[in-house]
Every structure is written in structure tokens, then in C-alpha cells.
Amino acid sequence: MAVVISNSNLNRAFKKLFIKGLPLGISAIFLLLLPPFLPNHIQGIIVKFLIYALFAISYDLVFGYTGLVSLGHAAFFGVGGYVVAVLSLHWANNLFWLGMPLAIILASVVAAIYGLIALRVSGTYFLLLTFALAQLLYSFSWNVRWFNSSGMQGIANISMPFLGFHIEWNNLSYYYFTFILFAVCFFVLTRIVSSPFGHALVGIRENELRMEALGYNVWLFKYLSFVLGGAFASVSGVLFAYFNRFISPAQFSLGTSFLPMVIVIIGGRGTLYGALIGAAVVVFAEYFISLLTPERWPLILGCIFVLSIMYFREGIGVYLMQLWKKVTKTNGSASY
């Protein structure tokens, strides 16, 4: 009898896990199978979506899970892009196995240094200090000629990555390259936020004083979250540099830092899938709206942001997931 009950509980747990993961599984199948049948420019739009989604979920670890409102996340995005750009410009080196690890290491070092400075304060002061620190890198990249191609601000003609074997780079091959890296990072971040470390971050976000009373080193957890967020942001910066074949000081700017914040708030903070939905809304809305009225895209993005705060305060992704749970619960109520 005990075995029967155990099997019943196992089947029920498996069914719940299957239902919960079904939207993500369908999305993964869609992203794997559909791109070869799409036009080149649509493949490029989906690559952009994956890059911005990775940038947003790296920010969500800091903002959504830990509760740190940063306006300097572009610093780590830009460091990642500039590492591979400088290697290409000055050493004609496009080896991926050198550029990507070096980008992650340098971005982590920058995040570690910035974290020591910024985490001395909190709230609005933390936000302003992270913005100021990112602007330091913006000014540095703008004024130091070594970080710019001859006669321009920024680095152009960045070489595509060399993986140790020949690949015919085109929109489709780079799409799958980006998809694999995105999937790996998403899986790792999923494991992080579902670990005891991730649960501690949520506890800090909800009630910092209580976590301190329980014996947690709150500052250390915040610091590690800040550094990890910077490391993952650098991966998206590397992918952006390869995709765009150009990087400029604008990648350190306020607008770049503001982008993942908007995406996370629209999609739903503290939920990695919310960042994915927010990135899809922003990237595809920008594409279709720009076909009609490109000059009004910033205004329309602002309207989307305001409407999401007014009517979808928890984020579009959260409300969609709640709707999915209601639908599956209604349809599967007889099974339970």
C-alpha cells in the first residue's frame, strides 16, 4: 500500500513539474526548430532578443532577487564587449576560448571593485553611485584612443569568434551559437536562484533585518550577487559585440543600463521567465513599431513601461504564469 501511495505522489509531482515547465519547453522547441525557416532579418531580431534577455536576467539576479536597484549594469555589459573588440583590434585575436573567459574575469573584477564601493550605501545613494561608476567607464572609453578605431569613437569590424574549428558564420549559425550560450547561462542562473543561496537573496530582498537576525552575512550575499550579475552581463556584452561587429562608449551609457531595468519591470522582477517575456515585448515591439514610426519608438516604449506599472505592477510574465496555472488547474482538476 505504501508503494502505491509513493508512486501516486511521484506521478503527481511529475505532472506538476511537467505543467510548470511546459511553456518553457514549448518556447525552447520554437527557438530550436523555427529559425531556419525565417528570413535573415528575423533571425537577427531573435538573436537580439536572446542577447537582451541574457542581459536582463543577469540584472534580475541583482535587482529582482536581491533588491538592489542599480543604474550601472551597463558597465559589465560594456566590459565584455570591449574585451573581444580590443583583442580583435590590437592583436587580431578572435579566439573565443580566450576572449570569453577573459571578458568574464575582467567584468567580475570590475564588479568586485565597484561592489566594494557601491555597497557601502543603500537605496537612492546606491542607485546614483552605480550610475556614476558606469559613467567613469563611459568617459574612459570615450577619451582613451586605444579603445577606439582610427578616426572614430568605438571599435568597428570586430572579428567573428574562432572556436578552434571552421564555421561558416551567417545569421543562422550565429543564432544557434547565441542560443547555446544563452541556454547554458539560463540553466546556471536557474540553479543559482533555486539554491539556498538564491533563497537567501530573496530573504534579504524581503526583510534584510530579519536575515541579519538569523545570522546571515547580508553584505556578503549582496556582494556575491552583484559580482555574479556582472559576470553574466559580460557574456551578453561579448555576444552583442560579435553580433553588432561594432561597440562604442554608448554601451556604458545610462540608456544601456536602463534597458535591462525596463525589461525586468515589464516582464516581472524576481522571475527569470519574466525577464524573457519582457525582452520579447521590448525587442519585437521595437521591430514592428520601427517599421511604422521609428522616431516615436522611445515614446511608445515609455508608454508601455507606464502601462505595465499601472496595470501589470507585478510584471506581464507573472500575470501570464498565474493565468497558465488557472487554466491547467481547471483542465486538470479531475486528475487531482
Image (cartoon, helix red, strand yellow):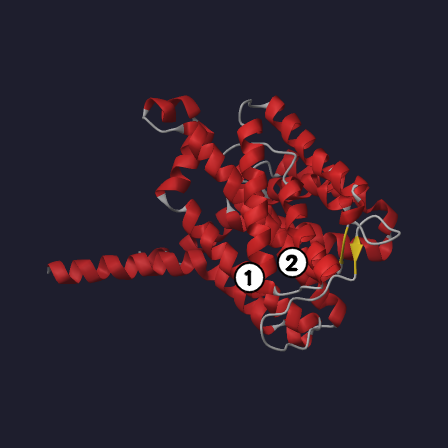
* Residue 61, above or below 99: above
Residues at badges 2 and 1 in contact (C-beta under 8 Å)?
Answer: yes
Picture quarter containing residue 39? Answer: bottom right
Reading the image, the residue beneath label 2 is 239
Residue drawn at the location 55% of the way across and 56% of the way down = 101
* Residue 311, above or below 292: above
Three-letter amino acid code at disc 2? Leu
- Viewer can see residue 276: no
**Closer to the camera, 91 or 163?**
91
Across and down, in percent, residue 61 comes to 51, 42
Residue drawn at the location 55% of the way across and 23% of the way down = 122
- Viewer can see residue 96: yes
Residue drawn at the location 75% of the way across and 58% of the way down = 89
* Residue 170, above or below 8: below
Reading the image, the residue beneath label 1 is 181
Three-letter amino acid code at disc 1? Leu
Q: Secondary structure at mark 1?
A: helix
